[in-house]
Image (tube, helix red, strand yellow):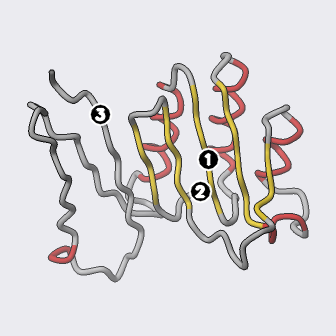
């Protein structure tokens, strides 16, 4: 049975030498197809557009865990997905409690369940899982 999993890995360190960008993806023994990996850069390397495109393609579920959440285009794409009936859930770092109106407030006001991780010193990761098969990570959120 072919693996239909898709992965997008987003790295945003502008100073990172390209020779260091060599992602490896383990492929199971019964997998005929390795997941696609895309490495994009920000601010003008297409990272935000790629995230928005994946969010527009979401069918069932989007899970978001982010330290801070500042991207207006990504927030809008999450709200649009929510309005289409996609189940969207967001978990943010406790530092977001003290932020003035932000993208986090935008998704909360749209009715997207949004939780604060106050149990850890810092929840510094930024990751999205879309429909259980697409993973996005990086600092564009």
Which structural element holds mark 2? Answer: loop
Q: In the image, what residue occupies the spot 76% across and 62% down?
A: 117
Which of the marked residues, 1 or 3, is nearer the chain's N terminus? Answer: 3
Location of the C terminus (image quadrant)? bottom right
Where is the N terminus found, in terms of image quarters?
top left
Please identify, in this view, whether the residue under mark 2 or under mark 3 is nearer the observer. Answer: 3
Residue at (82, 56) in percent of width and height? 102
Q: Earlier in the sequence, mark 2 or mark 3?
A: 3
Q: From this view, report whether residue 17 is shown above or below residue 128.
A: below
Cα distance, mark 1 to mark 3?
Answer: 18 Å
Q: Is residue 9 above or below residue 53?
A: below
Q: Return the residue at label 2.
A: 141
Decide which of 45, 10 is in the foreground and name it. 10
Q: Which residue has dot 3 on it? A: 5
Disc 1 + disc 2, Cβ < 8 Å? yes
Quadrant for residue 29, please give it. top left
Compared across the picture, whether 110 is left or right of 29 comes to right
């Amino acid at each position: 049975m072919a693996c239909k999993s898709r992965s997008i890995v987003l790295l945003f360190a502008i100073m990172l030498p390209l020779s260091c960008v060599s992602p490896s993806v383990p492929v199971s023994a019964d997998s005929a197809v390795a997941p696609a990996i895309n490495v994009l850069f920000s601010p003008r390397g297409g990272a935000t557009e790629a995230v928005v495109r994946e969010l527009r393609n979401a069918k069932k579920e989007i899970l978001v865990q982010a330290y801070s959440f500042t991207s207006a285009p990504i927030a809008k794409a999450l709200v649009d997905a929510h309005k289409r009936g996609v189940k969207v859930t967001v978990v943010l770092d406790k530092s977001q409690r003290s932020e003035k109106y932000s993208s986090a407030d935008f998704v909360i006001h749209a009715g997207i369940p949004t939780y604060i991780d106050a149990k850890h010193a810092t929840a510094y990761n930024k990751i999205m899982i879309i429909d259980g098969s697409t993973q996005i990570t990086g600092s564009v959120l």
